[in-house]
């Protein structure tokens, strides 16, 4: 059984870069999950569903006739905002009444949303998968000799650090970010000094879900948009958050890097079991550092 | 030297630091068999930390803890239980979903090394011993009530009852009458005195209720800011100027 | 009175057992299959509840052991050359082994971390099974699995499932009411105090894990007996969460809660599925209502009422 492939330096490099661009999406999704987990202490299983909805919304907006290439860019803004709006209603309407419950109940409650959303998507978009191409500008690949790199992946690669910086700025340099970080550690204290913790939570939750939608929007042109997307991404996102350290954004980046790179390398050396490599990496990391590589928020 | 009995408990120069904060520092304690020793001190003096160190919830940074001559420093809590040390907690720490009977029974079953018995019906086991303990603390008539629904005073008594499950040689009580009414305190005091008289139990406890401390303890050890100031008889402690300065003259006094 | 309660429970159970025994005489093949599925799922949910409701452990990926048991049976039956009966030994043994290995790795942690590590280990197992096409059938799974001649009929499968389920439930019931079970519940309510009264909490939790995993493996073998097929979905995390929902629905502090929850979910899924393809959202809404209004579950609600009425 031939499970290995020919590896050249060039193909390795190419694969690593593709892995890094996948890291961008994983990081965006995982950081949103990590934010919510760190500040609100909710393991939001529905995060994956919101990602999927983001992808489907992007497809719909981008496919509107007459928009052409601009459709994608509009969708890239509209889809995450749409997802954020949905999350706002969930949080204010239902979730905020349950903050005193334990993790397991909160997890189950968000799982209920996963169930409802998956049927909602089936109802609105049907069971078939969707796909569409990136805008002309980002189609095709750059070629350097034998080395060929898809433009869209380059775009993702460039976007990654930008989002990371943006998040860092939001959580460390803005007032609301600092309040959120304080609330993550001690919500009672923050409430005691007169801040409306409830709205802080709403804000963080919406931002987190916005990121899920953004991840979905960005991934939409690169793969088939299917029903099972929510289930696979949420596991990956959770594992990344766990190995990175709960609530730690840089941890999410580190975890996403590990995940993306092991996946990419796996495709190259054992294509059939490529999917196993990231999970194995997670198991190894957690066996050595059970609470994650970087410090968790609680 | 043959014939010299080791002390029941000896704490020798134990230190413990948390994140730079020195919780206990060179603390010393001696408890002889059959004695009742009280540890007193202002809030934050390190009394509960000391108890945690003795019962294995925490491991000391340095120093030694000897139980009947045997070094138990840093041992795990479940092993310390097996040696014959038992503890009750300041904040009620019972099995709130189980009945009063089951609460005590669990301790007895563990003591009888039956914790892995998966086949026999638990309700048929350790009944006599459990009922005896419940009777001795006065909770026999409440045996079938869910412990979570008991009054606070009864729960504190149950606290002590659970600690009696292993026929302890050394009973450590962390503020056994905290939050109790004067009447309940009186009952608990009678109960503890009876335990001493009937079983010759050695008791180490800490309290803020000075009346109880001075009437019940053979010796008192005074702590402040993690250090042992003095350990002596109640009369000597009362008149010790260091103690007066540190504690009895202060504002933490609850009752006399 | 307590004695009265036990007697009533025993009578109720006997009644149900008699109904189940008589069922093949007046129910069609489809309904016998459905009951078999309920029993199997109920057994699985009860095995989960050993550590979830009675142990307080965040068992997020219990279905791994179910899947391991199911695949063990299937692979022994189809690929080992041994008679299918050997599968009934392989399933619990392999599931026990899996729960021991996974348990050893995860038991050091508690609560959310424990659950998440178990989730990741379970996902690793899923990924391997999902991709190992040549051995496990990969995405397609395995079909047409042989079961022993002696029970290879509708009634045979039915009675076999019934007997195995009853035996397993009885064993688990005894365990919950044994000293080990009491101590285990003590660990649930107060791990620190349980440690202080002489119990090595981690080793007891590990034993609990292996017990729960073993019975899940038995349920896996029963599933294959019933369905004749096995597929990677059995190892997927969504099934694990569904099992937790069943325990929650029935009441996870009550022994028969998970069984009731499983019965309700399986029946609802089957019959709602006739009218609509959107069963999933029905389950989701039921779950939300449960968390909001009845977190102690159905039997838990009745138990609480009963306890407050007693003197």
Image: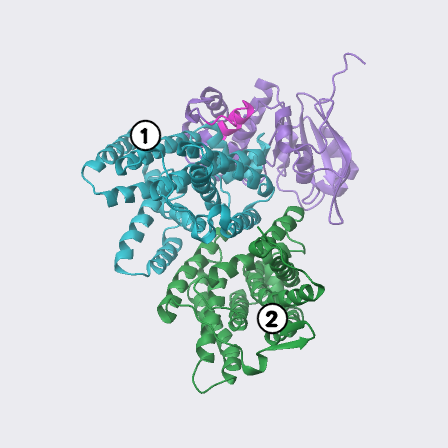
Q: Position of residue C188 (x, y in %)?
A: 50, 39
Q: Position of residue A252 (x, y in %)?
A: 62, 61
Q: Is residue B118 above or below residue C71?
A: above
Reading the image, the residue beneath label 2 is A176
Residue C6 - label:
1
Residue depicted at x 33% and y 49% = C265
Locate the N terminus of chain B by quadrant: top right
CA–CA distance between discs 1 and 2? 58 Å
Specify the segment rendered in magenta.
B103-118
Along the line of sight, the residue nearer the viewer: C205 or A4 = A4
Residue depicted at x 26% and y 36% = C155
Q: Colour of chain C?
A: cyan
Q: Is residue B48 above or below residue A272?
A: above
Q: Is residue C306 above or below residue C122?
A: above
Q: Position of residue B77 (x, y in %)?
A: 63, 33
Supply the letter of whichever chain is purple.
B
Supply the letter of whichever chain is green.
A
Along the line of sight, the residue nearer the viewer: B250 or B192 = B192
Is C89 on the left-hand or right-hand side of C303?
A: right
Is A266 on the left-hand or right-hand side of C225?
A: right
Numbered label tally = 2
Would you say residue B178 is visible in this rendering?
no
Looking at the picture, the colour scheme in use is: by chain
Residue depicted at x 46% and y 32% = C181
Residue B106 lies in magenta, yes or no? yes
Q: Secondary structure at mark 1?
A: helix
Pointer 1 chain: C
- Contact between marks 1 and 2 (CB within 8 A): the answer is no
């Amino acid at each position: 059984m031939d499970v290995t492939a020919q590896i050249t330096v060039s193909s390795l490099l190419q694969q690593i870069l593709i892995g890094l661009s996948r890291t961008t999406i994983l990081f965006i999704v995982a950081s949103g999950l990590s934010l919510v987990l760190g500040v609100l202490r909710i393991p939001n299983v529905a995060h994956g569903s919101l990602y999927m909805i983001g992808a489907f919304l992007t497809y719909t907006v981008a496919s509107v006739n007459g928009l052409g290439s601009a459709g994608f860019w509009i969708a890239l803004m509209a889809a995450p905002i749409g997802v954020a709006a949905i999350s706002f209603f969930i949080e204010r309407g239902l979730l905020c009444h349950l903050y005193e419950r334990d993790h397991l109940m909160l997890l189950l409650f968000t799982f209920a949303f996963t169930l409802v959303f998956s049927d909602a998507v089936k109802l609105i978009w049907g069971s078939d998968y969707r796909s569409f191409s990136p805008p002309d500008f980002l189609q095709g690949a750059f070629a350097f000799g034998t080395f060929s790199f898809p433009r869209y992946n380059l775009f993702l690669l460039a976007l990654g650090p930008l989002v990371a910086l943006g998040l860092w700025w939001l959580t460390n340099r803005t007032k609301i970010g600092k309040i959120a970080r304080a609330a993550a550690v001690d919500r009672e204290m923050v409430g005691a000094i007169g801040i409306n913790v409830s709205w802080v939570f709403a804000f963080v939750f919406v931002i987190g879900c916005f990121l899920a939608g953004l991840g979905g929007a960005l991934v939409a042109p690169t793969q088939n948009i299917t029903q099972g997307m929510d289930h696979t991404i949420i596991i990956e996102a959770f594992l990344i958050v766990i190995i990175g350290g709960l609530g730690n954004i840089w941890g999410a980046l580190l975890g996403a890097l590990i995940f993306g790179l092991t996946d990419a390398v796996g495709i190259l050396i054992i294509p059939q079991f490529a999917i196993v490599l990231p999970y194995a990496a997670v198991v190894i990391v957690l066996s050595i550092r059970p609470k994650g590589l970087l410090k968790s928020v609680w | 030297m043959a014939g010299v009995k080791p002390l029941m408990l000896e704490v020798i120069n134990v230190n413990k630091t948390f994140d730079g904060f020195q919780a206990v520092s060179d603390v010393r304690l001696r408890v002889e068999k059959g004695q009742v020793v009280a540890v007193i001190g202002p809030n934050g003096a390190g009394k509960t930390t000391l108890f945690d160190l003795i019962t294995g919830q925490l491991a000391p940074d340095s120093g030694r803890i000897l139980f009947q001559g045997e070094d138990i420093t840093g041992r795990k809590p479940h092993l310390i239980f097996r040696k014959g040390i038992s503890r009750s907690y300041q904040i009620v720490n019972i099995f709130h979903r189980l009945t009063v009977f089951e609460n005590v029974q669990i301790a007895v079953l563990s003591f009888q090394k039956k914790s892995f018995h998966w086949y026999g019906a638990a309700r048929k086991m350790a009944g006599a011993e459990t009922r005896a303990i419940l009777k001795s603390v006065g909770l026999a008539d409440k045996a079938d009530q869910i412990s979570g629904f008991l009054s606070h005073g009864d729960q504190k008594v149950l606290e002590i009852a659970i600690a009696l499950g292993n026929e302890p040689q050394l009973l450590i009580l962390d503020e056994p009458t905290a939050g109790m009414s004067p009447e309940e305190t009186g009952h608990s005091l009678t109960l503890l005195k009876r335990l001493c008289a009937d079983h010759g139990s050695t008791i180490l406890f800490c309290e803020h209720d000075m009346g109880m401390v001075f009437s019940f303890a053979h010796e008192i050890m005074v702590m402040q800011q993690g250090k042992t100031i003095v350990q002596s008889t109640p009369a000597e402690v009362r008149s010790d100027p260091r103690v007066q300065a540190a504690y009895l003259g202060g504002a933490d006094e609850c009752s006399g | 009175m307590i004695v009265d309660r036990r007697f009533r429970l025993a009578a109720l159970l006997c009644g149900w057992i008699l109904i189940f025994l008589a069922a093949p005489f007046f129910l069609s093949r489809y309904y016998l299959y459905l009951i078999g599925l309920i029993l199997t799922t109920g057994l699985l949910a009860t095995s989960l509840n050993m550590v979830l409701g009675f142990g307080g452990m965040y068992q997020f990926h219990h279905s791994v052991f179910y899947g391991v048991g199911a695949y063990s049976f299937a692979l022994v039956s189809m690929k080992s050359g041994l008679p299918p009966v050997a599968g009934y030994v392989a399933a619990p043994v392999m599931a026990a082994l899996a729960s021991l290995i996974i348990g050893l790795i995860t038991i050091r942690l508690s609560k959310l971390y424990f659950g998440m590590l178990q989730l990741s280990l379970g996902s690793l197992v899923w990924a391997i099974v999902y991709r190992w096409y040549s051995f496990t059938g990969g995405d397609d799974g395995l079909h047409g699995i042989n079961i022993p001649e002696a029970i290879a009929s509708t009634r045979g499968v039915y009675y076999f499932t019934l007997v195995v389920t009853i035996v397993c439930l009885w064993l688990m019931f005894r365990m919950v009411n044994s000293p080990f079970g009491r101590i285990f519940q003590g660990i649930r309510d107060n791990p620190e105090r349980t440690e202080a009264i002489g119990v090595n909490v981690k080793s007891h939790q590990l034993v609990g894990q292996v017990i729960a995993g073993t019975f899940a493996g038995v349920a896996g073998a029963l599933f294959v007996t019933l369905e004749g097929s096995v597929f990677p979905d059995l190892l997927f995390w969504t099934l694990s969460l569904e099992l937790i929902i069943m325990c929650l629905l029935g009441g996870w502090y009550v022994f028969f809660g998970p069984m009731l929850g499983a019965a309700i979910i399986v029946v609802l899924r089957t019959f709602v599925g006739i009218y609509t393809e959107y069963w999933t959202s029905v389950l989701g809404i039921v779950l939300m209502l449960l968390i909001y209004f009845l977190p102690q579950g159905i039997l838990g609600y009745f138990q609480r009422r009963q306890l407050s009425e007693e003197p």
